[in-house]
Amino acid sequence: MGASVGVRLAAARLTELLSQPRYRRRWQPHSSVRRGELSRAAVAAVLDAHLVETGEVGWDHQPRSLQNRVGRALNGDRLSDATLELFIAAFEMTREHADELRALVRGRPLRNQLVVATQLDGEEPLPRCTVRTLQVAEHHEIGPDRSPRQHVTRQLLEAMEPTDRQHYAFDTPHAAVTVLTGGTPLRAFRVTGTQLCAVEIALTEPLLPGQTTHLEYRTAFAYPGPPVPEFRKVVAASMRHVALTLRFDPSCLPREVSCARWADVDSTDPTDAVPVRLVGGQTAQEVVPDGEHVIGWRWTW
């Protein structure tokens, strides 16, 4: 399982990187599709130009012969070492990005990164919470395969007792967690009696009761198939502000999206659901919680 998960994680991260300005400016001039949508034909043109420049193919080589290779790589179907190195060289990727992609393909950790599927450390109960979230901002992205691509979480935490740990739980092992600021991921384990996985994060600085710290982490997903088309967030009365953003890949927009609320995490159907309109493929909501409940979105394809 580890190898295929690693390939899917690397493919998802590669797709995300190619959408960033640093690499987008290389393929954008070759694209004829609308702005904002990753063009695989344009990406193939960049790879082909590199192969011609290095003498690996002749000047009459056709870029379209690389499109299937690009498609397999970005879909996570096949991403060989040779193909990955071609992307890295053709787009002149930074050492940090290149090392991250190589590690993901092999299911290996990097500093501040943990590949959950290949590093699950048994099963145990979720430890008692020693911090509470005062503010949280979360950005959830759905990829062109109708599956979650990545999730970025920014938290302001307050210690309720002396602590140097935070535990982050989610519902799939097909993920890689990278702590961007505020800590380091130590290990992953399955939560006893549930389908949840948890990542233990060591905070950069230990906290005394009442002290606060900022923590930011990114979760890259590699689902083997599209999960239930919804996103849920449990909010508590202790939270002063919650800001959520949901974004869909421009090439795969849903027919309808509803802002929803559920009675609890075990509820199948929401108690409220209000249709919302996407702007630029995304929607957002902000709340000041008045109690514990579950909010989010559900959509239909």
Image (cartoon, rainbow, N blue to C red):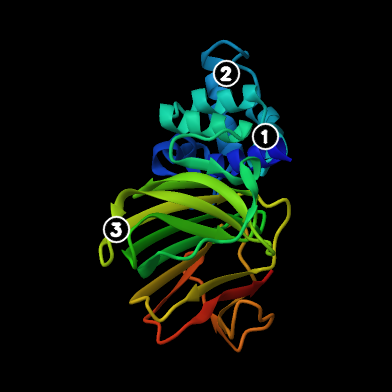
Considering depth in this image, is 221 or 23 the residue closer to the camera? 221
Q: Which residue corresponds to the image point at 63% horizontal and 45% vertical from the top-left?
A: 120
Q: Secondary structure at mark 1?
A: helix
Horizontal side of 205 relative to 6 (left or right) equals: left
Percent from the top left, x then y, of residue 19? 48, 45
Q: Which residue corresponds to the image point at 60% horizontal and 32% vertical from the top-left?
A: 44
Considering depth in this image, is 109 or 71 the residue closer to the camera? 109
Q: Secondary structure at mark 3?
A: strand
Q: Is residue 94 visible?
A: no
Instruction: First in sequence, mark 1 or 2: give its number.
Output: 2
Q: Secondary structure at mark 2?
A: helix
**Residues at badges 3 and 1 in contact (C-beta under 8 Å)?**
no
| Distance in Å between CA atoms under marks 2 and 3 | 48 Å
In the rendered image, which residue does mark 1 sit on? 67
Callout 2 environment at 10 Å: few (<14), some (14 to 19), or many (20+)? some
| Distance in Å between CA atoms under marks 3 and 1 | 46 Å
Horizontal side of 10 relative to 155 (left or right) equals: right
Q: Amino acid at mark 3?
A: Thr
Tell me which corner region of the image, top left, top right, bottom left or bottom right, holds residue 228.
bottom right
Considering depth in this image, is 263 or 22 the residue closer to the camera? 263
| Distance in Å between CA atoms under marks 1 and 2 | 14 Å
Percent from the top left, x then y, of residue 281? 51, 65
